[in-house]
Image: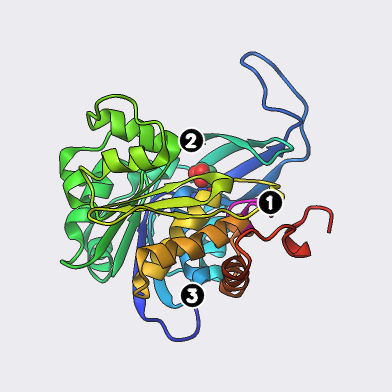
Amino acid sequence: MSGGHLTGHVVVVGSANVDLVVDVPRHPRGGETILGGDLRRTAGGKGANQAVAAARAGGAATSFVGALGRDDAADLLLGSLESAGVRTDVVRRVEAPTGTALITVSPDGENAIVVAPGANARVAVGGEQAERVRAADVVLAQLEVPLEVVTAAARARRAGAVLVLNAAPSRDLPAELWRELDVLVVNEHEAADLASAAGSSGRPETPEALADALLARVPAVVVTLGPDGSLVARRGAAAVRVPGMRVDAVDTTGAGDTYCGVLAAALARGADLVDAARLATAAAALAVTRPGAQDAVPTAADVAALAALAEKQPSADPLPPVLRKDR
Ligand code: RIB
């Protein structure tokens, strides 16, 4: 567990994958074979990435509720989670291969990902996991595990605990889950999918219009906008744009997960949603400057330094040398 004074508890319910990553000159077309760089095998999975980000953000205890096989990929993931300070004692070990993600990364840092869920299909919120969820101030989930698991976690949380859902990868949500959500975090594509599934009339074009459509179903929506930062929208308040930061992107894998984990940790420490989004934006900007998912999650000190710089010089360009590819 992270050192220092811990003022809240984040419980992340979700997936863990071993990421098999290849740098490619461009993503292959259907039916095409291309040559890439050397294979990298690193710790990933949206749930595990978010747990590592929450733990590394500091100030809040972090537990992970997930499922792993009995293979060396599981050892890699447990090692990464535990060295970040995540509690893994309620992770299930199951007779299925640990989840695997096949990832290609192009020179501009964009990725394409296919996930073989394996053990992630067996995540469950049983006795000890439900007890851990009940201890949470913030429950953070994504959609790489069965929807029933997310709904079970939503039911298990205590009154007053905040449920944050990162609706990635995008899928329709059952009415019960919509009713339970406190904060929805989505990128623009996921926001558009959910807004149309929720019966929004017309096609909202701007992030503000998308968030507005989603506010009919959830009290707060955060739309992540990649290099343009993020938008925080809450019922009854004006939407707030948190500006992005100019960085040289090396690998965007896991940047959204870093955002969600840091946001959840800040909320568990008692931060306001907009302040939490500022820290999360700085953390995600740092994450894209480094390769890998969990390997790229920055420390709390680096995040605080960048967030402070952004506040002082909102249009800072160039950024500090640490963020440049050619350093
Ligand atoms: O969000 C990035 C993650 O998506 C990768 O780590 C991969 O495992 C997939 O889950």
Please tell me whether mark 1 or mark 2 is closer to you in this view.
1
The image quarter in which residue 217 lies: top left
- The reply to whether discs 1 and 2 touch (Cβ–Cβ < 8 Å) is no
* Residue annotated with mark 2: 116
The kind of secondary structure element at disc 3 is loop
Magenta span includes 316:
no
Read off the magenta span: 286-293
Residue at x-position 16% and y-position 47%: 179
Three-letter code for the amino acid on which mark 2 is drawn: Ala
Q: Main secondary structure of the magenta part?
A: loop
Q: Residues within 10 Å of mark 2 (few under 14, many from 20)?
A: some
Q: Is there any visible trace of residue 71 in the rendered image?
A: no
Q: Farthest top residue?
A: 31
* Residue annotated with mark 1: 291
Front position in the image: 41 or 237: 237
Count of numbered circles on the image: 3
The location of residue 277, given as percent across then percent down, is 44, 60
Three-letter code for the amino acid on which mark 3 is drawn: Gly
